[in-house]
Amino acid sequence: MKEQVLHVKDLTFGYSKDKQLYNDFSLSLHVGEIKAIVGESGAGKSTLFELILGNLKPYHGEITAMRVSQVFQDPYSSFHPSYKIIDQIKDVADTEGIQVYLDTMNLEMMQLQKLPHELSGGQLQRASIVRALLMKPKLLLLDEPTSALDNVIQLDVMKMLLTQLPNMGMLLITHELELASWCADEVIKIS
């Protein structure tokens, strides 16, 4: 059995006691697995990530997660606007091996020497993915990681992410059921 990187047991949570987003929700994820969370806006997909990260506390249940990194849907909100991207990567990760990721993501080191607003949304999202991978997580949380990318780059990025599965487990939030069905071992629908 592969190493378990996420265990959610009997999770109950809502922003009000009258409306629960999760009621006795359970989930487990192991190294080598990718599971996709799909659902309408407001169903609680991003809230689940906030609970896993410990930014929100559940009413009931337990969550155990191994070393986590995250790729946010909006890359501009995940980087400080007045610091070079490379410095923000170095703040949280060792940059050894960065060139392999840059080549795969079609980025150049000189682009990382810039401020976030000097890159396109797609370039910044790819830099965000590079940063998340350099953190060497056991659990990678992906919140719409390819929504800012064109279709060809989307496919290349997802294929590259799948090559990382021997080292980690991934939990993917997406509105794209076709993408979820293509890459995930399990698709979990939240309503």
Image (spheres, rainbow, N blue to C red):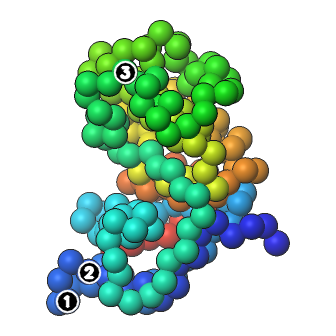
Quadrant for residue 121, please give it. Answer: top left
In the image: residue 55, left or right of residue 96 = left
What residue is pinned by disc 1?
A: 17
In space, the residues marked 3 and 2 are separated at their CA atoms by 37 Å
What residue is pinned by disc 3?
A: 84
Quadrant for residue 79, please give it. Answer: top left
Residue at image point 37% right, 86% down: 12
Q: Are marks 2 and 1 in contact (CB under 8 Å)?
A: yes
Check disc 3 and give the amino acid type.
Lys
Q: Element at badge 3?
A: loop
Front tag of 3 and 2:
3
Residue sitting at the far front:
91
In space, the residues marked 3 and 1 are separated at their CA atoms by 43 Å
Q: In this picture, is 164 found above or below 66?
A: above
Residue 151 visible? The answer is no
Quadrant for residue 94, please give it. Answer: top right
| Earlier-in-chain disc, 3 versus 1 | 1
What residue is pinned by disc 2?
A: 14
Front tag of 3 and 1:
3
